[in-house]
Image (cartoon, rainbow, N blue to C red):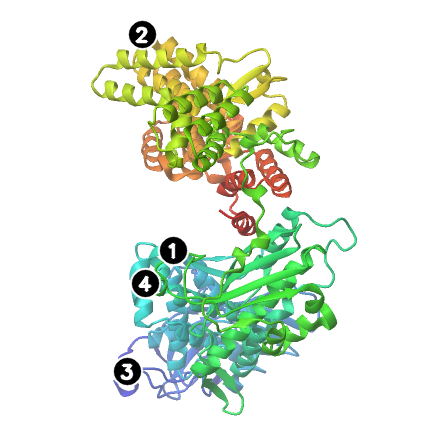
């Protein structure tokens, strides 16, 4: 401001007599200039020159003359400073603008440590600096404000005065934010809100510090701002990403369970695919900052850019130091690990890698065959650092495109070494590991791929297969990882830079036909170790598809018929199958097929037609279709009658009616079959105990369900509707729709107790989030209308937090419920407690999760991948553990 200074308040003229006993100190360099302000007068503190609340208490002032001061602040003996513009006689009754506080949790000794806090615009105190008090002197530490030589060896009065001028007065005068402290602002910004704005604010405060000669950002934060800029922050590309992210915000998380690094993602992978490399580079900047700061430890905020740059380069080039000891497998002293433990070990080890730049990988395992294969995606040259600190230049120097490409290849090769070491480490049974790596690319370059694991893309950089003895001999892999990996890869016969390098996941050595075989077509016994976790003794005890076995028979017949040379031979083939089968459905299907072949109604070379004719038309599905047409015309009673006749015909045939030895059941997935099996094992479903379970067609279940739906508003036929509802629950003991539709029928006639009881029966076994959410939604309404308002509120909240399927409707009803005088919104941590107190089942239970995981492991070890995928997918819907998800992916399609 200088000569144009418009500040007129706060001026105090002291009389000469009062100055006889006064103490005043001018402090050089206490007010550095800033934009729009160039100090013309000295600043400092005075004592006993003006009235004050206590003896020897001080004022911070601008010296305008020998006896004239501009009063800026008052501070007391407790290191509290208050903004004032005139002398005061009573202690201020306000929050101090600046405080100096000693840390309470420090050992007694000659050194005292504490922090400096200022009052921000929101009325909160926040730390701007730390201090050390030693041998009667104060030392200011950790601030971005450059106190130079004036930040150490200070007496109390100078210490407080310089703090106030730097952290309160100068920012207010210059219209800037108070100087920051350390590097904690980075994590604060990243936790505060949307990552795209947080990154811009981080870069912005560094730029602001660079523009102010009195401020110096920590070297590591200056480096972060540089890395973010190189990654594209502030570029046109980032602006486009920002525009997309308005409708689908980027999300930033710390992967706490495993690597504890940053992950930058999006809820719409397809929309973000064209920006994949930018996202990887921005995430990489954050992880470089994180890993370097952790390496520097307590010195991170004080480290120079030179030290930061050296650490950054070292950490990028030494990623392979994280490799496990491939020559010392975890099962070296025990029985060889099974498929599950190998896959889980690989997935967890990959997730634990703490890397400056992200990579992704799919993998497959054949433990019996001794081979593991990885197909990975690694950062390309565009993601690699564009500058590097060079001491000889005393600054950052540009890295050429060619250097970045070489560094990207080294990084990819080290990733391959780490993957191979991880695989060899899991089991002595693994003798070979194949790895291929291709560079990440944007979605615009790979029309067939998007998301976290794009399926198409640029050519693979290389493919290599390592053999255990050669890989581990003389720690060759470690030498390659810590040095130049190119010679080792060449020695191992790697295919580098060639066109059309195939995915190692397609290697026939990984194939095992048994893994794709559905349990419906086999009567083989289960391995003993899998019986209890799967609740079964034979593969057929896991079956869920009623027509799968017949379809398999039909497909085998179609193959044989296509090869036959005459109608007589074809009839003989079908007749032999009919005579060998005791299954009435198969016998009927064979008769139908022989009639068609004899009458030349079907082309014997059309295998699809042969299979379809063998299977025949499902009369129950046809009945449902026709009934729905009738219902649309308003012919509800006629539609119900037709469905009832179809159901009666099916059950009176004797094929699906329960007997003393057999029950007929339906299941919507292998996961639900395992849940049923384990529940039977635990004593549930007493009616089914000690009886063989055969499959009923899903269409029978859907016919019964359709009747319940059609009759739900026919109050004079409620008992009939409930009868069919109970048949639904009997046919599909783990099927949500039957329970929920039956509960709705009870609810429509005002029977809230049976509504709640029916839903609770389902929740005891429920595993599907959408159906669980629907269950709690219906239960909430029933509890509300039964007068249990707290349970109603909890039910709606439980539904809304379980799945979004009915979120909007649940929210509207919850708002209406909260208008009731005695209804109150519950905090999230009380929802389950309130439900349990009202006898409501909490689903899924921890026991259910444990059982699903046990069953998954057993199914994988038994080679039942069809079953394992279903069970593990159900688990991951509730517990999306990154490693478990990757195990699921490893089981193939």
Badge 2, how many Cα within 10 Å: few under 14, some, many 20+? few
Query: Which badge, 4 or 2, comes first in the chain's sequence?
Result: 4
| Quarter occupied by the N terminus | bottom left
Please tell me whether mark 3 sits on a helix, a strand or a loop.
loop
Query: Which badge, 3 or 1, comes first in the chain's sequence?
Result: 3
Residues at badges 1 and 4 in contact (C-beta under 8 Å)? no
Disc 3/disc 2 C-alpha distance (Å): 90 Å
* Residue highlighted by disc 4: 242
Label disc, if present, on residue 5 of the rendered structure: 3
The residue positioned 64% from the left and 34% from the top of the image is 533
Closest to the observer, 71 or 479: 479
Label disc, if present, on residue 586 of the rendered structure: none
Please tell me whether mark 4 sits on a helix, a strand or a loop.
helix
Query: Which badge, 2 or 1, comes first in the chain's sequence?
Result: 1
Residues at badges 3 and 2 in contact (C-beta under 8 Å)? no
Closest to the observer, 688 or 32: 688
The mark lying in front, picked from 1 and 4, is 1
* Residue highlighted by disc 2: 716
Residues at badges 2 and 1 in contact (C-beta under 8 Å)? no
> Quarter-wise, where is residue 611 in the image?
top left
Badge 1, how many Cα within 10 Å: few under 14, some, many 20+? some
The residue positioned 48% from the left and 85% from the top of the image is 25
Measured as percent of width and height from the top left, residue 710 is found at: 31, 17
Label disc, if present, on residue 269 of the rendered structure: 1
Badge 3, how many Cα within 10 Å: few under 14, some, many 20+? few
Query: Which badge, 1 or 4, comes first in the chain's sequence?
Result: 4
Disc 2/disc 1 C-alpha distance (Å): 52 Å
Query: From this viewpoint, is residue 145 visible?
Result: no
């Amino acid at each position: 401001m200088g000569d144009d200074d418009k500040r007129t308040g706060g001026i105090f003229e002291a009389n000469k007599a009062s100055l006889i006993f006064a103490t005043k100190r001018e402090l050089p360099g206490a007010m550095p200039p800033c934009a729009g302000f160039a100090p013309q007068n000295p600043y400092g503190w005075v004592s006993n020159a003006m009235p004050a609340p206590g003896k020897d208490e001080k004022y911070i002032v601008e010296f305008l003359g020998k006896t004239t001061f501009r009063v800026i602040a008052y501070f007391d003996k407790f290191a509290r400073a208050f903004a004032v513009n005139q002398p005061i006689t009573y202690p201020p009754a306000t929050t101090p603008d600046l405080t100096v506080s000693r840390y309470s949790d420090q050992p007694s000794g000659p050194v005292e440590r504490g922090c400096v806090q200022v009052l921000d615009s929101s009325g909160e105190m926040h730390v701007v600096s730390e201090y050390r008090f030693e041998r009667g002197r104060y030392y200011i530490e950790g601030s971005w404000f450059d106190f130079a030589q004036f930040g150490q060896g200070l007496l109390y009065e100078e210490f407080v005065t310089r703090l106030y001028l730097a952290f309160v007065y100068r920012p207010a005068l210059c219209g800037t934010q108070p100087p920051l402290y350390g590097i904690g602002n980075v994590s604060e910004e990243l936790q505060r809100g949307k990552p795209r704005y947080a990154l811009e604010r981080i870069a912005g405060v560094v730029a602001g510090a660079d523009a102010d000669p009195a401020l110096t950002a920590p070297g590591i934060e200056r480096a972060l701002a540089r890395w973010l800029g190189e990654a594209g922050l502030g570029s046109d590309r980032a602006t486009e990403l920002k525009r997309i992210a308005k409708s689908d915000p980027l999300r930033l998380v710390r992967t706490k369970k495993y690597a504890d690094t940053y992950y930058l993602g999006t809820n719409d992978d397809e929309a973000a695919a064209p920006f994949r490399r930018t996202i990887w580079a921005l995430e990489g900047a954050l992880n470089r900052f994180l890993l370097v700061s952790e390496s520097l430890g307590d010195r991170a905020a004080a480290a120079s850019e030179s030290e930061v740059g050296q650490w950054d380069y070292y950490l990028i080039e030494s990623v392979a130091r994280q490799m496990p000891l491939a020559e010392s497998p975890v099962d070296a002293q025990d029985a060889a690990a099974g498929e599950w433990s190998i896959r889980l070990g690989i997935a967890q080890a990959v997730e634990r890698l703490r890397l400056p730049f992200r990579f992704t990988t799919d993998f497959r395992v054949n433990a019996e065959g001794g081979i593991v294969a990885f197909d990975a995606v690694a950062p390309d040259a565009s993601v690699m650092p564009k500058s590097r600190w060079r001491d000889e230049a005393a600054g950052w120097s540009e890295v050429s495109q060619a250097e970045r490409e070489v560094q990207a290849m080294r990084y990819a090769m080290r990733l391959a070494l780490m993957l191979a070491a991880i695989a060899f480490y899991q089991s002595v049974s693994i003798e070979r590991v194949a790895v291929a790596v291709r560079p990440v690319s944007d979605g615009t370059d790979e029309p067939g791929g998007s998301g976290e694991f794009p399926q198409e893309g640029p050519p693979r950089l290389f493919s290599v297969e390592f053999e255990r003895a050669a890989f581990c001999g003389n720690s060759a892999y470690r030498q390659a990882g810590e040095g130049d990996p190119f010679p080792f890869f060449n020695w191992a016969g790697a295919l580098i830079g060639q066109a059309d390098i195939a995915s190692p996941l397609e290697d026939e050595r990984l194939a095992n036909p048994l893994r794709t075989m559905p349990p419906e077509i086999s009567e083989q016994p289960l391995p003993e170790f899998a019986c209890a976790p799967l609740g079964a003794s034979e593969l057929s005890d896991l079956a869920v598809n009623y027509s799968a076995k017949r379809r398999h028979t039909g497909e085998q017949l179609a193959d044989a018929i296509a090869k036959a040379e005459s109608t007589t031979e074809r009839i003989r083939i079908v007749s032999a199958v009919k005579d060998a089968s005791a299954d009435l459905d198969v016998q009927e299907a064979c008769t139908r097929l022989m009639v068609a072949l004899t009458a030349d109604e079907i082309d014997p070379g059309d295998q699809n037609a042969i299979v379809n004719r063998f299977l025949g038309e499902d009369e129950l599905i046809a009945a449902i279709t026709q009934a729905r047409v009738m219902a649309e015309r308003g012919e509800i009673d006629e539609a119900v009658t037709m469905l009832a006749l179809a159901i009666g015909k099916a059950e009176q045939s004797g094929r699906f009616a329960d007997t003393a030895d057999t029950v007929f059941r339906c299941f919507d997935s292998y996961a639900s079959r395992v849940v049923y099996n384990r529940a039977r094992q635990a004593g549930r479903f007493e009616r089914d105990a000690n009886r063989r379970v055969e499959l009923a067609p899903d269409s029978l279940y859907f016919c019964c369900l359709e009747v319940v739906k059609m009759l739900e508003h026919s109050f004079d036929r409620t008992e009939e509707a409930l009868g069919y509802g109970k048949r639904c629950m009997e046919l599909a003991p783990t099927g949500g729709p039957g329970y929920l539709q039956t509960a709705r029928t009870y609810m429509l006639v005002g029977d809230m107790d049976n509504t709640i009881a029916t839903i609770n029966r389902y929740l005891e076994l429920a595993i599907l989030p959408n159906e669980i959410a629907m269950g709690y939604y219906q239960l909430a309404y029933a509890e509300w209308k039964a007068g249990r308002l707290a349970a109603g509120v909890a039910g709606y909240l439980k539904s809304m937090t379980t799945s979004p399927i009915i979120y909007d409707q649940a929210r509207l009803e919850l708002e209406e419920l909260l208008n009731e005088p005695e209804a109150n919104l519950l905090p999230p941590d009380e929802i389950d407690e309130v439900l349990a107190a009202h006898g409501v089942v909490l689903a899924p239970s921890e026991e259910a999760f444990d059982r699903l995981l046990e069953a998954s492991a057993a199914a994988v070890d038994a080679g039942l991948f069809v079953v394992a995928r279903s069970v593990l997918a159900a688990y991951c819907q509730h517990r999306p553990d990154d490693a478990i998800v990757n195990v699921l992916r490893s089981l193939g399609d």
